[in-house]
Amino acid sequence: MIFFTQKHRGAPFLCPAKSKFSVLLLCFGVLFSLQVFAQKISVDYKNVPFAKAIADFSKKSGYQFVYDAAFLKSASPVTLTASNANFSELVPRLFAGQPFTYEVNKKIIIIKARPQLVNPIQVSGKVIDTLGMPLPGIDVQVKGETAITKTANNGTFTILSFTANPVIVTRSMGYTLKETPLANVKSADLISIVMIASNANLKEVVVTGYQTLLKERTTAAVVKIDSATLNQQLNPSLASALEGRVAGLRFSPGSNDLELRGPATFQSLTIGTYPLVVIDGLPTNLRIEEVNPYDIASVYVLKDAAASSIYGSKSANGVIVLTTKSGAKGSVSINANADYFVTTKPDLDKMHYASTSQIIDYETAKYKSELLNFANPATMFASYGDVGVGNIKYYSPLYQLYRSQSEGKLTADQVNNTLNSWRNNDYIRDYANNVWQNETRNRYNLSLSSGSAKSNTFVSLNYDESAMRIKHNNSKALTMYLKNTFDFNKWLTASVGLNGRYTNSNATDNTFSNYDLQERYARIVDENGNLVYSDYANVNDGFSGGGAINGQVASRLSTSPDFKSFRFNVLNELRNGITDTKAYNLRAFTSLRAKLLKGLNYEISFQYETSNTNREQFYDQESYKMRFLYNVMTTFNTATNKFEHNVISNGGRLSQQNARSYNYTFRQQLNFDRTFKTGNLNHNIVAIGGFEARQNESPLFLSDVRYSYDPQLLSSQPMDFKSLSTTGITSYLYGRRTMSGNNASLENPLNRYVSIYGNAAYTLNDKYNLTGSVRVDQASFFGLDPEYRWKPIWSVGGGWNVSNEEFMKDADWIDYLKTRVTYGINGNSDLTSSPYATATYKNDVLYPALIYTNISAFPNPKLRWEKVTTTNLGFDFSMFKNLLKGTLDLYNRYSSDLLTNNDLDPTVGLKTRVINNGNMRNRGIEVSLSSDWFKHKGLTLGSTIVYAYNKNTIIDVNYSTTSAFSYISAPTNFYFANTSFQTMYAYKYGGTVNGYPYFLDQNGNPNVTFDANGTPTSVVSINSPAALVPVGKLLPTFNGSFSQRIVYKNLQLNMLFVYSGGNNLRKEVVPLSAIASNTYNEGIGQLYTNGFTDMPRLYFEYPNAIKNYASTLSDLWRYGDNQILSADYIKLRNISLSYTVHANFLKRIHMTNLRLTAQANNLWYWSKAGNDIDPEAYSLNSGTRSLTIPKSFLFGLSVGF
């Protein structure tokens, strides 16, 4: 071929005729080439081998390819779809990502080696999203080169480039492929790459634990929370990180409990509402708050049957799938986190307690009212017992003050002066100032990630230390996690890991953790900080069957050398009776995956879990409880005229408890995934089939309690519990007393499960989805009856990717739209029920050689799984170029064969029995909307709204009781058909006459009759359930959240508001018949006799002749339908501010990440009930406050290297 060249300078250029003809041919060829380059070509390659792709391309374009066959060995498959595209546009896309380049010469495309640098450049950088959050697991490649690496958990990467001015290609499902050209890049430079979320619904994967699917190919209701979202705020636990993120998932901050789509069972205590937790595909007995949140890459919440029915008889409450982090290919990356939490003391002002002065007035009025029942104070106080007389009952120091006055030991002025001085005391404030402290928590996490072409490793170590609100209460936890993955060759991959956690906690005896332990006018310390001792307290030992003390008895014994002092100060007791708990749990797991054929692989997995918990509680011999026990067990020998201490002498009390568990899961599974084409139809089939075996064993051993224990000598005194528990002793103070030992016992619950399962998903043309699953569970405690033994748990589903239809092409405002519908069955199992008669083998201290059996439960041969059938209709959408994304789900969950009490014919030997008897339904709607609705010059404003509504109805139940109060006090155990589970019932309030309330019975008649003066003459109890009226629900019918993100460059502000409502609560009222309490609410100052008419008379305001009526009316007043308020609330759960240091600066200090976070939790709330009621810290059914959830402040530091 002849090319034009320039002649020597100075000589004229001549073009002979032959040359002119050549020029004409050349121009014609160029014009022809331009025409060909402009021609339109359509291709559709899905993972097609490069050789096959260029052969098809050559046929359609008319171009010939010239290449060395060795090049094709390193070529990557081609995925390229285009319709009527220009030739010039397609050729670069055809060669994108290939380890060679090309040159077009006329009708020939020459494939040639890519020029390489002699000294490669090391390119380092960090990949982040539009919010500045690091993105782990992103594929990073130099365009045209074969090497691929993944970003580490902090988003950083390092890769070698053999190309000058390379183009860095980053890709990941859910994000738009990004090509970042680099000019004059040096190894010392650190680049920053921002990935933009693509039509994420098309590319996002769904991990169900058994398999991983593209979201576009699923029909299930699944919510994913990725690592970036989880770490937007500092979270005390992984459970709290889910709050407000998942529509329909209700989180209780006090208990860390989770409930998905309403209650699916009546057995909230035995089965519970907690979803099944799955870690890396295998079910575990762990709760998610026990998992280190820094180890988690993503969380998937499986809501409907299509997603969760594959988990069988443990999936009715939903499933939470945790995917842990893995090592990333490339150099070693190290990440460290240091978090500090401080939680303030609860706000006592929001408890609305009565003042000390009001309590003194109340108790004084009660004393005077009680005195009317006796001839004089002496006979009244005689009823409280005395030393040597027995029948000892407690009375308060205020009563003792009046007793001393009646006995002439104090004058009226002295009593009044003392009471006035007491009015300035406040035991609760003293307790808060001296026993409570601000809670603090330090959490440190260190992780290491590395990987190569053949393996990757992720290791983390987490240390968590807390000082609790009560002094001397603390906890420590050390968690270790290791995960290794090995690619032995192209067809064999293995992973192995170990997760261990050790905890040690110390907790004060519950008796002394009560801040209302003593009267409000008592003191703990004086003005100088010196301890103030009470001569006695309303506290007994708790080991010997109780016993009380009062001022008279304490005074008489205080001078006796044969008895120990009853003096009490809570600060001396905080270190006594502390329960020291040490526990560990280990989870070891491994899996092996082998590729058998194209699209077919075999996987085997095994997981072993074990835990061991030891609890030890020790009371020193000088502790209050041991002194009390010493006095209780003191006897008097009339023969020797001496006191004896044969049962309890000097020494302390030691109790120990041990619990263990051993669990394993073994699984074998075949996985099939193939995409193929028939004509114009594209098919994708994903299927799995497997076998699973599980065993849960939880032996519990209780050791003997040791008395007179010496912690130095490790010695104790033998106890004759045979005699103590039968004959007992004659206590000098309390008469006959018995005491039982905590005899050693062994329980060994063992449950085994065997399952076979299958799941398949078919997709046609990326538009239409069909899914199905089936599972059969067999268990050691279920399914004796052949009718139920082999009943499967199954699901079917269909999906339609509407946005992929041709008729949607013009609707450019809709980026993505998918509809899906599923129907299926989940199961629940109650391990406390059995098809067999169960019994306990035991012996007795009376006859230690005789083994006998106690029947624990009668057999239930028709016992079967609780069944939950769910229908779900869902819509996923994205609009306005991903400006608005959302999900809408409507569901119907029908729970049948629910285990609950059933009325039986008494002739069978039982009146009631827990059997599969009840049916219940939950219907609801869930909405999630999110939008980054403002972006301009580094400022991004984004909002997310989550809303869920649930209507619960009990369809059928065959159990009733004749006690109206049972329906009021225990709504989880007693209910009516056609009502909601945990419906709140109340007595029908009729009105108040002269300060005396009355209520209406089932016939509408008042239960109180009055004389002409308005004084009750008779009061009748209301016992019929027919007299009750429903006054709302205890469980909320709607809940959700609103979160706001404000991002400006490297600064990010996040706010999370949560809300809940549609349920009710009872008012906090003063019981009409109660004795004085240390924490009565401020209502006791509004006495009827003081002229306040919004409250009825209290006990001491009743005439003496009808005082007993107060006790009858008290519960009616407390649980009347006039005491109902709304439980709706809104809370600012947290607000956080974080700053991420710029990548260029980090490069200079040899770091890859540096982030600072400050956060505040629970700063504000609004409650419709008013009066500072916090429904999250309130017993809705009983109408009593708990301590409000205090404010907390969190500070976090995250660094990466």
Image: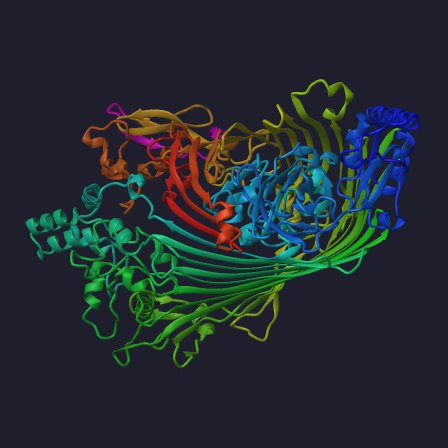
Question: Looking at the image, which residue sits at the far front?
Answer: 10
Relative vertical location of residue 269 with respect to residue 39 in this rendering, above or below: below
Q: Is residue 184 covered in magenta?
A: no
Residue sitting nearer the eye, 800 or 8: 8
Task: Please tell me in which quadrant of the rendered image residue 110 appears.
Answer: top right
Q: Position of residue 729 (x, y in %)?
A: 37, 71
**Residue 833 shows in this picture:** no
Q: Residue at x 40, y 60 (%)?
A: 474
Q: Position of residue 61 (x, y in %)?
A: 88, 30
**Residue 439 shows in this picture:** yes
Relative vertical location of residue 771 with respect to residue 467 in this rendering, above or below: above
Q: Position of residue 1192 (x, y in %)?
A: 38, 46
Relative vertical location of residue 530 with respect to residue 1020 in this rendering, above or below: below
Task: Please tell me in which quadrant of the rendered image residue 531 appears.
Answer: bottom left
Residue sitting nearer the eye, 735 or 1130: 1130
Is 1107 left, or right, of 173 in this rendering?
left
Looking at the rendering, the stretch of residues picked out in magenta corresponds to 1011-1032
Q: Is residue 1013 covered in magenta?
A: yes
Residue sitting nearer the eye, 1142 or 999: 1142
Q: Position of residue 80 (x, y in %)?
A: 79, 34
Residue sitting nearer the eye, 982 or 571: 571
Task: Please tell me in which quadrant of the rendered image residue 363 appears.
Answer: top left
Q: Residue at x 77, y 60 (%)?
A: 488
- Quadrant the N terminus occupies: top right
**In the rendered picture of this protein, how many numbered marks are placed on residues?**
0
Is 683 left, or right, of 199 in this rendering?
right
Is 1187 left, or right, of 839 in this rendering?
left
Q: Residue at x 68, y 27 (%)?
A: 816
